[in-house]
Image: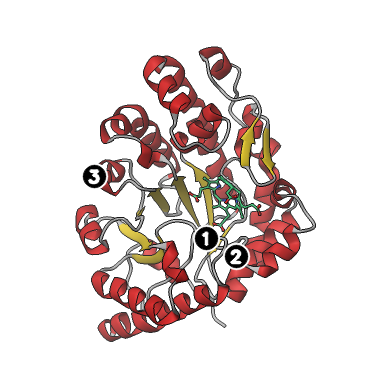
Amino acid sequence: MAYNDLFLRACRREPTERTPIWMMRQAGRYMAEYRAIRQAHGFLEMCKTPELAVEVTLQPVDLVGVDAAILFADILLPLEGMGLDLEFAKGEGPVIHNPVRTLSDVKALRVSDPIEHTGYVMDAIRILRQELKDKVPLIGFAGAPFTLASYMIEGGSTRAYINCKSLMWQEPEAWHALMEVTTDTVVEYLKAQIEAGAQAVQVFDSWVGFLSPSDYAEYVLPHTARLIEEVSGLGVPVINFANNASSMLDLVKSAGGDVIGLDWRIDIAKAAEAVGPEFAIQGNLDPMTLFAPVEVIERKAAELLEAVGTRPGHIFNLGHGIHKETDPDHARALVRAVHEHSSRIRGASAS
Ligand code: CP3
């Protein structure tokens, strides 16, 4: 099969004969092939063993038929090199044993050296480019400064962001210093991924939707904008995904990027209009749609594609990560539906 660069062309807003699709968290637990490997290895161990990371990155490309691979890794990996003690505890998700709560905690952090501390990620990228050369492009990624800072301050996942927001409002100096060192770390990390061969990079701001627009503008946007600015112009598209932030798309857009990632809480036609023609868009099917019968999945995919029409620069994706209970046959059905239906819409307009 010939190399499929639809994803990269869509990122650049070039015409495509059909719409490319990939799914956030496509390498993961909904696949039996992933669970078989995971059973024998810890999650961090998998991330740090390039051969295993490569294998699970390729699984959804080969078995689900997506148009791009996303590196199997985690947004929290660079935190170790900053001086944080990270663990993925069974059944609990990520835990940071030495959370950041004061200015002196922030001052003790350093910028992680991407090669010294996360060289295994770059090794996996180099192997993947070899393995993928006749298939699809490879996406690298990192967490956005806010989402990473929220884990560093809370020490794990949270619902209320009490410590995080308290630090932000009570100790703005500590807050901004933390955002600075985190931004510097992510800039170096993404530059190293691009140098190793990542063909696009996605910035995940998974939890930024917990902020009000004015707090996003004051405490987060300047840092995210600097991050995106510093990794733009390196020859690879940057995807800016701010989850649950469709009520502040104007601000998200001003942080930059080539592609704006959309969650499912906004109508895609409205989002496309709000974002404007100078950005590509990525999204935005509710991930839970994959629990519906296949006919419903097909109808929802078709409706979404019809709403986008022939606008140049649409990458089909879920509005957030695929759920671990998803039936892989339903993920495959979605990919098939997007390919078939978008060929009808876009193929017709291309000829
Ligand atoms: O998209 C992909 O397939 C690439 C792999 C990927 C993982 N994590 C693998 C993973 C990516 C892109 C991430 C990013 C990530 N990690 C984010 C941002 C993405 C998003 O959903 O918004 C976040 C917030 C994290 C932090 C993280 N990692 C959490 C909160 C958890 C626990 C979640 C849970 O459901 O248990 C992880 C673990 C994790 N990262 C798993 C995978 C496949 C599950 C680990 C396992 O096998 O037990």
Dot 1 and dot 2 residues touching (CB under 8 Å) = yes
Label 1: few (<14), some (14–19) or many (≥20) C-alpha neighbours in 10 Å: some
Estimate the x, y position of residue 281 in percent, counting from the top left: 33, 59
- Residue 268 is left or right of residue 183, and the answer is left
Estimate the x, y position of residue 102 in percent, counting from the top left: 52, 15
Dot 1 and dot 3 residues touching (CB under 8 Å) = no
Q: Is residue 277 visible?
A: no
Q: Earlier in the sequence, mark 1 or mark 2?
A: 2
- Residue 189 is left or right of residue 176, and the answer is right
Q: Looking at the image, which residue is at 39% across and 34% down?
A: 226
Q: Nearer the viewer, residue 338 or 154?
A: 154
* Disc 1 target residue: 323
* Disc 2 target residue: 30
Q: Looking at the image, which residue is at 61% across and 34% down?
A: 79
The image quadrant of residue 166 is top left
* Disc 3 target residue: 250
Image vertical order of residue 271 relative to residue 300, above or below = above
Label 3: few (<14), some (14–19) or many (≥20) C-alpha neighbours in 10 Å: few
Three-letter amino acid code at the position of disc 2: Tyr
